[in-house]
Structures are given as C-alpha cells and as structure tokens.
Amino acid sequence: MNRPPGPDPADIPALPPACPHRRDMGLPDGPRLTPAELHAMENERLLAAWEEYERTYGPLFTLHGDGTAPRVYISDPRAIRGLFIGNRTVWGARGTRYFRPVIGAQALPYLTGEAHRAVRLLLAPALHGDRVRALGPALDDIITSALDALRGTSVPLVDLTRDITLRLIVRVAFGPLGDERRTDCVRLLTEIMDLMYEPAASPDADTATVLRRVTGRVHELQELVAQEAGVVRAGEARHRDDLLFHLAAGEAAQTDEQIRGHIMTLLIAGHDTTAGVLAWALYQLELHPRTRRRVRAELDAIGAAPAAAEVVRLPYLNAVCAEALRHSSVVPAGLARIVPEDLEWAGHRFPAGTELVPAIHLVHRRPDLYPDPERFDPDRFLDRKPTGAHYLPFGTGSRRCPGAELAEFELPLALARLLQTPGLRLTGAEPGLHALKNGPTMTTPPSLRVALDDRASPQPPRGQGSPS
Ligand code: HEM
C-alpha cells in the first residue's frame, strides 16, 4: 500500500489566487432555492441536484435559501485541503439538525474548538488499535446469530447488514450486555432510527416534530445507559474494556448527561453508515461475478477458518471495501463547518455564519481523479492506500470520522464472512439501482433482498471464537 490514484495530496498546492472558480470577493455562485426546492434537493434529488449545480457553477457552489445561512458545497480537493486541513480556523459546528434532540447539544457533532478536541480524545481509546482488533470473535458471533435468524427467510439486504453493525456498536459501547438488555437496546435504536427516517422527516424537520416522534424511546434508551453507568460506578463491573466503562469509571469520569450524549452519538453514527457500505459492496459483487470470484479465491487461499487478523489484511478484499466506500456515497457530505467570522480566502469572501460543506460524493465522482467514476473497480485501490483530500469517505481534518478504524476493520471481516456463507443469496440485484436517502446517509433500496437457504449447512467454525 503506498500511493493513491491521481496526484499525491501532498503535491496538491493550496488553491492558487487565480483559480478557475475564483469570484471577486463574494460567495461562489449558485442557485437561490425556495424552501420547497431546498427540501426536495435535500431528499429525493440530493445527489442529482449536486451534480447539476457542480456542472453549472463549478466545484464551489453556494445554495441560497430564504432565512437559511448560505451553504457552500466544495468538491475541489485543493480547496478542501486548503480550508479544512491547511487552515487554522476553528470552525463552528452545526451537526445534523434533527439529531440534536436525540443526542443532545453537548454531543461531539455540535461541539467546537477545545471542547470538541477533548471529547474526541476521550472516545479515541475505545475506537482504535487493540480494542478494535479484539472485536473479531464478537463480530463472528454476531454474524452467526444474524444468519441463524435469517435461515429460511428473506429480508431487505440492509436489514441484515444493519442488524450486524448495530449489534457490534452496542458491544463496543456497553461491552457484553445481558441478552435482555442487548435486545432492548437494539430494538430501541432501530425504532428511533426508523421514526426519524420516515419519509416525512427531513434534515430541516423542526425540533418539535422530531421530538414528538422519538421522545418515549429516547428516554427509555437514556435510562438504559444511566442504569448501566450505575452498575459500573457501583463497582459491580470490573476490568471491562468498553466505552461505557471508560466513560463512567475512567480518569475523566463523566456526568450521566455527558455519558448519554457520547454513547448515543456513537450508537447512532456507528451503524447505519457501515451497514450501508456493506450492503452496497454485496450488491456490487453480485453485479460483478468476476470480482466476486476474485475475492472468494483470495479468501479460499487462506484456509477454511481464517482468524479475523488474517482476513482484514487481504489486499483485494480491502480494495473492494475501499472502492465500495468511494462508490456508494453512503455519507455523501461531511458535516457543515460554520465560518466563525468573515473570511477571505482564494478570492472569495465567506460572511460569518456561512456553512462550508465537503461534498464527498462529488469528489468521489470526479473523472480527473477517478476515470470512469461510475464503474465499480476495486483495482483503483489495489496496493494503494487511499488517503488525502481526494478520498474522503470518512471526511477530513479535525472532524474526520472517529469510527473510521472500526469501520475499516468491520467492513472486510463482515463482507468476507457473508461471502463465505453457503446458501446466502441476493435477490432484486438489478443493475442501476440507486441508493436511497436514509436520514443523513444513503442506503440500498428495500427491493434488494437477501435470503439464506434453509438447507444450507451452518457456518464452519472460525479462528478462536469467544462469547460476545
Ligand atoms: C463506513 C462507515 C462510516 C462512514 C462512511 C462514516 C463517515 C463519516 C463522515 C463523512 C463524517 C463527517 C466527517 C467530516 O465532516 O469531515 C463522520 C463523522 C462522524 N462519525 Fe463516522 N462514518 C462511518 C462509521 C462510523 C462509526 C463506526 C462510528 C462510531 C464508532 C462513527 C462515528 C462518527 C462520529 C461521532 C462523527 C462526528 C465527528 C465529529 O463531529 O468530530 N462513524 N463519519
């Protein structure tokens, strides 16, 4: 792994003063939209509208709406690099508006500056290194149990992948919860997400509407978190390595409200995302049998029951995951950064309050960086570690996704295990399916389903299993 496709980001100069999309000291050009147009654009027309505006206005364009701050979408890697990595501005944060009542205003996506940095440092140990690698056996057990439930039936593919990623993030957050508690937690989170993502909900749905939908369940989940924190504080749980233990009993012990915010943030941000990419990867492999056979051959070459550590090192499998992360646009944009005070930059003036958004989907569809960008082609990433401002599935700069390492462990392992499951079949995998909007993420449509043959023999034993 050494070199991403296209120019090395280190070689990309800061945006030159005479860049082609320079406008003299104003916001970049862009459309003025009515609230209804803005709503439609944020929902059913999301990606198509961005592509159209980029074609019309260039790689920096501004959406103007009545009563809302101007929002500038940026698909030029040099501009993304110059603004979000090479610039010392402490950006304000907007987070996703309709998550705020659920995870609380003190949660990571709404914090800025030092408070933001401190929370990221606090969460980091649970999401990196040995802690992540130790999750292999738990993920295997979760997949086995999800497949047992699927045997003889068929469900939308994303329901299966979501079940897997949700159970894993619950494991990361709470450690090995008792069966009843774990089932409650998974059920509550599923219900909360489903209510929030009903078609009527939109990123601009007002707080009261969102609260009415989910209040009861959010309180139940908060209560569950508080009770588990109580168990940790009472010293009934010892030597655990989960996030809750770290937050409630660690050196920087947190209040109940802070713990709830941090745990809820990770539970919500940490499963639909990975589930969407996993489903997209399976769909693409169904459409590309040669690619699928190549992954299978690589897996077969390491034996019938390889340990997680061996699987996640496989080069072609990793290239498939990297390409699925690029191609799926599961998180099509980074979090909006709010300009703290009037900013002049590369020939533009961004008034205080302007929202700057890394347009991840558009970067990943640039033909100069990814020739024939609609083609699913893992060879783009074979033996090349994709990094830098032109590969942004996890965003960039100080807000880069803190769960990236976990996701990059979970994705290849889960994909490998599912591909090696005898009798697992996708149905409805027609070419040209479009990802659907699912809150701030994108997902595969429900017509894409997965079934597990009733008569297929169960999975072979793997690595060294351990209870989850
Ligand atoms: C394939 C899976 C995932 C993708 C594609 C993804 C993508 C992203 C993106 C694009 C951002 C915004 C970054 C920016 O604006 O620069 C983000 C933020 C975030 N992600 Fe992820 N993510 C994934 C998995 C996870 C997981 C597993 C977790 C938790 C364990 C997680 C937790 C978060 C949090 C808490 C933030 C907010 C960070 C902040 O405000 O500082 N994500 N993610």
Image: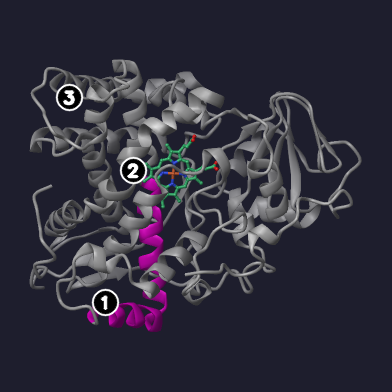
Secondary element at image label 3: helix
Q: Is residue 245 visible?
A: yes
Magenta extent: 272-300
Kindly identify which residue carries mark 2.
127
User: Residue at the front extreme?
Assistant: 251
Q: Position of residue 185 (x, y in %)?
A: 21, 33
Image vertical order of residue 100 relative to residue 143, above or below: above
Kindly identify which residue carries mark 3.
228
Secondary element at image label 1: helix
- Residue displayed at 43% across by 42% down: 402
| Residue type marked 3 | Glu
| Residue type marked 2 | Leu
Q: Position of residue 323 (x, y in %)?
A: 48, 66
Q: Position of residue 249 (x, y in %)?
A: 22, 23
- Residue displayed at 22% across by 45% down: 167
Label 3 – label 1 distance at C-alpha? 39 Å
Q: Is mark 2 within 8 Å of ligand 1?
A: yes
Kindly identify which residue carries mark 1.
299
